[in-house]
Image: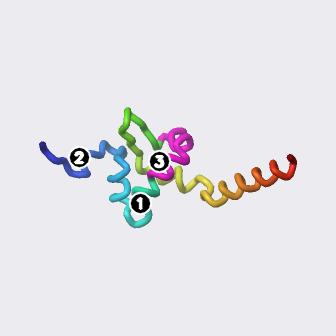
Amino acid sequence: MATTSDQELCVENLCTVKILAKRYSDFLTEGGIRWTIFNRSRQLEAAGALYRRGRKILLDDKRYIKAILTQPPAEKQVERTAKAGTAARKAA
């Protein structure tokens, strides 16, 4: 079985989660990328940063970085959800 290098797996800007984490290891981790995919897949797909082909997940590295930089931080989303839950409980 022949092995391929990380560069051969990338097609232009498309790469796998592992390759993206290696390429931007200064500030991205594989787990962080997977968390973002799980929690923000709709936004990433709308931005053209996420492509799914069966079980394979491919990311456009430039669009992915742009998408995560333009999205609000997760803490603010959690705060909004918590406030909505508190308001619903008070109304009931």
Q: From what the image shows, is residue 79 above or below residue 8?
A: below
Secondary structure of the magenta portion, mostly? Answer: helix
Image-quadrant location for residue 31:
bottom left
Residue in front for this viewpoint, 12 or 38? 38
Query: If you read the primary sequence from the N terminus, does the residue marked by circle 3 or circle 1 appear first?
Result: 1
Disc 2 packing (10 Å; few <14; some 14–19; many ≥20): few
Frontmost of labels 3 and 1 is 1
Q: CA distance from mark 2 to mark 1?
A: 21 Å
Distance between the Cα atoms at labels 3 and 2?
Answer: 20 Å
Query: Circle 3 sits in a helix, a strand or a loop, which is it?
Result: helix
Which residue is denoted by mark 1 in the rendering?
Answer: 29
Q: Amino acid at mark 3?
A: Arg
Q: Which residues are magenta?
A: 34-48
Report crowding for label 1: few under 14, some 14 to 19, many 20 or more residues within 10 A (C-alpha): some
Residue to which mark 3 is pinned: 63
In contact (CB < 8 Å): disc 2 and disc 1: no
Q: Residue at x 66, y 56 (%)?
A: 78
Mark seen at residue 8 = 2
Q: Amino acid at mark 1?
A: Thr
Q: 7 left or right of 80? A: left
Residue 34, image x, y percentages: 45, 51
